[in-house]
């Protein structure tokens, strides 16, 4: 694990937000014994857990624990001289067989070792039965590590749920209990919400759990302390499946699209940064770097201009050394020099990334053509069937093909029978019969389907989803160069419309096809607040937590920041999510993994 933890001591929005990390760290340390007695201990991590744990546990903390070996869980066990083993894993059946293999292998080297399997966020009956079936349940102690909401940045919290969107496809609601628990823990730390809104069926389940919990607790405990966060919005990803598959066109969004961001880290080829070598370089991306915080939410069309201005400012800072007149001024300049050099280094890094992105999205690149197709479909309903056919015949990346195909389907109310049948046949023929299930999953989600009548034109008009002048208006549509995410437009309506979602009841129920509601808070806990984003009597903006079940994209996070930073807004947003999502991750979630 690499030290990448964002510094939250001076969090601008939520005071003491680091308490969420501290709670998680304390729970982790409670599982690790203070001493191991005779022998030594090995910590073996599910590879998918290494990154999320790195957001909680710093290397220096692990060095203080009585652990002699830290390694990742792989199919081939390693020979170890340790006699105590801690396995931290997500509850996946395929991992139980690997753990069993480790145990059998180790028992041949050192008999009667101690084994503890720690499930994140909790153990499941299926995993327990699998360990029993494999003949090792009697050898292990089972524990749980809940790892609720972890700060990814000062305004972004994640549960880092593995396969959160896949659970939506499989209609698996088991993780919704964990979502509700994480919300209740958040309230315990920062105070009771004054209003709770929900939209979508999964959100309704979480809201129902919260409702029952609050009804019970109100009868037993009337003590309250002032809330730091006024409002909670629970958003079900199924309500808007279009926005995550549209190419993100902010600086941060394109970094995620092209290189991939995992747990707040991007890994880059050294050549991108103008360095030599073959080993990828890890770059943390968070608000600790002030320059990055300023550019991450910008549309790519504005980033180049910003870099020019910043470079001139840094150059002027260096030139000040030529006008130093006395020792006092020299001391002042020397004090500023380290921060000036750090800013210069950051600028070089981000310009290098920017130039690489421009190269990959410019000219006649495939990515540029794809973006043009997306905006054509979303802006005025154009069709790009010929382009899609060519992409399939060229055997282009299946993620790319399916994203564009689903955008075409979702924005057209489905495909005509002949087009649906044609693309289904061509994809199976070109990419393999195993993708019959992929297409079935997309059909189940309503992302790839036969024509049923198009309501998207009404949604686009009524929610003002497309804005050609996004750079001038600073509208949230800048995150996709003209297209505003439905998800964020709905949240915007909740604040800007007089009666919130009731004002757009027909759009939500009959056009989008979902339902919404509020949690009825116990009478003693109700507080009237002015939730209109345009009417502010206070100088300090109110805080709202938006919880996405099934994932949120960096573009949507940027859109919420833009919404909160508008001059006439009296609310700012903290984003919580089961996981960070992008178009490729969403599409890959529909693939059937061979076991």
Image (spheres, rainbow, N blue to C red):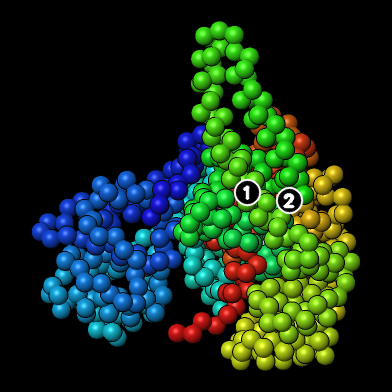
Image: 167 above or below 323: below
**x and y, in percent, of residue 327 in the image:** 52, 9
Which residue occupies the foreground of this view, 304 or 185?
304
Residue that badge 2 annotates: 300
> Is any atom of residue 462 visible in this view?
yes
Image quadrant in which the N terminus is located: bottom left
For the C terminus, give its image quadrant.
bottom left
Left or right: residue 351 compared with residue 468: left
**Which residue extends farthest front?**
276
92 left or right of 351 in image: left
> Real-space Cα distance between discs 1 and 2?
14 Å
Say whether residue 290 is left or right of residue 492. Answer: left
Quarter residue 166 falls in: bottom right
Residue 554, image x and y in percent?
A: 63, 55
Residue in the image at 53% along x and 51% along y: 275
Q: Residue furthest top?
A: 326
Bin the neighbour count of mark 1 within 10 Å (Cα to Cα): few under 14, some 14-19, many 20 and up.
some
Q: What's the residue at 13%, 72% (across, down)?
A: 110
Residue at the image point whose x is 61% and y is 59% from the top: 256
Q: Is residue 583 above or below residue 533?
A: below
Label 2 crowd bin: few (<14), some (14–19), many (20+), radius 10 Å: many
What percent of the width, then of the height, locates residue 107? Answer: 16, 76
Residue sitting nearer the eye, 86 or 261: 261
Residue beneath label 1, please? 352
Q: Quadrant of residue 144?
A: bottom left
Disc 1, SS: helix
Residue 260 is situated, as x and y percent measured from the top left of the image, at 57, 61
Q: Nearer the viewer, mark 1 or mark 2?
A: 1
Task: Decide which of 370, 161 is in the foreground and name it.
Answer: 370
Against 569, is 577 above or below? below
Of the image marks 1 and 2, the number of the one nearer the N terminus:
2
């Amino acid at each position: 694990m690499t030290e990448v933890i964002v510094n939250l001591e001076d969090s601008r929005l939520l005071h003491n937000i680091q308490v969420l990390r501290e709670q998680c760290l304390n729970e982790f340390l409670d599982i690790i014994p203070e001493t191991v007695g005779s022998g030594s201990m090995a910590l073996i991590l599910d590879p998918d857990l290494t990154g999320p744990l790195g957001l909680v546990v710093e290397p220096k903390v692990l060095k203080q624990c009585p652990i002699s070996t830290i390694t990742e869980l792989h199919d081939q066990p390693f020979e170890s001289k340790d006699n105590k083993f801690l396995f931290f894993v997500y509850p996946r059946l395929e991992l139980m067989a690997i753990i069993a293999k480790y145990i059998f292998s180790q028992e041949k080297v050192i008999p009667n070792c101690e084994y503890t399997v720690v499930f994140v966020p909790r153990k499941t009956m299926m995993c327990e039965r699998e360990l029993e079936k494999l003949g090792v349940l009697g050898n292990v102690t089972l524990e749980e590590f809940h790892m609720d909401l972890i700060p990814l940045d000062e305004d972004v919290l994640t549960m880092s749920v593995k396969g959160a969107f896949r659970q939506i496809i499989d209609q698996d609601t088991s993780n919704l209990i964990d979502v509700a628990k994480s919300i209740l823990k958040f309230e315990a730390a920062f105070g009771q919400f004054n209003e709770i809104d929900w939209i979508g069926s999964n959100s309704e389940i979480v809201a129902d759990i919260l409702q029952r919990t609050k009804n019970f607790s109100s009868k037993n405990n009337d003590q309250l302390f002032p809330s730091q966060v006024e409002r909670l919005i629970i958003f079900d990803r199924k309500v808007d499946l279009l926005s995550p598959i549209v190419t993100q066109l902010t600086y941060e969004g394109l970094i995620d699209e092209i290189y991939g961001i995992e747990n707040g880290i991007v890994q880059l080829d050294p050549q991108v940064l103008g360095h030599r070598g073959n080993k990828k370089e890890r770059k943390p991306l968070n608000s600790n770097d002030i320059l990055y915080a300023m550019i991450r939410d910008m549309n790519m069309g504005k980033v180049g201009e910003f870099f020019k201005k910043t470079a001139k400012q840094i150059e002027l800072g260096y030139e000040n050394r030529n006008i130093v007149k006395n020792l006092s001024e020299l001391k002042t300049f020397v004090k500023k020099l380290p921060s000036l050099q750090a800013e210069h280094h950051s600028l070089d890094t981000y310009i290098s990334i920017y130039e690489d992105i421009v190269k990959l999205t410019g000219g006649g690149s495939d990515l540029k053509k794809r973006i043009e197709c997306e905006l054509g479909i979303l802006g005025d309903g154009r069709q790009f069937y010929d382009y899609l056919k060519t992409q399939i015949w060229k055997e282009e990346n299946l993620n790319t093909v399916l994203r564009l195909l689903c955008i075409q389907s979702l924005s057209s109310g489905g495909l005509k029978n002949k087009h649906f049948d044609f693309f289904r046949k061509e994809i199976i023929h070109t990419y393999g019969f195993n993708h019959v299930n992929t297409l079935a999953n997309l059909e189940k989600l309503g992302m790839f389907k036969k024509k049923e009548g198009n309501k998207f034109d009404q949604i686009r008009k009524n929610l003002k989803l497309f804005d050609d002048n996004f750079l001038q208006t600073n509208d949230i549509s800048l995150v996709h160069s003209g297209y505003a995410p439905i998800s964020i437009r709905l949240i915007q309506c909740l604040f800007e419309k007089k009666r919130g979602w009731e004002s757009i009841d027909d759009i939500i129920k009959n056009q989008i096809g979902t339902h919404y509601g509020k949690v009825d808070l116990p009478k003693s806990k109700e507080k009237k607040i002015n939730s209109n984003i345009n009417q502010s009597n206070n100088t300090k903006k109110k805080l709202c937590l938006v919880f996405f079940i099934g994932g949120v994209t960096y573009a949507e996070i940027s859109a919420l920041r833009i919404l909160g930073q508008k001059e006439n807004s009296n609310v700012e947003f903290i984003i919580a999510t089961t996981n960070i999502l992008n178009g490729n991750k969403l599409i890959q979630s529909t693939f059937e993994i061979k076991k």
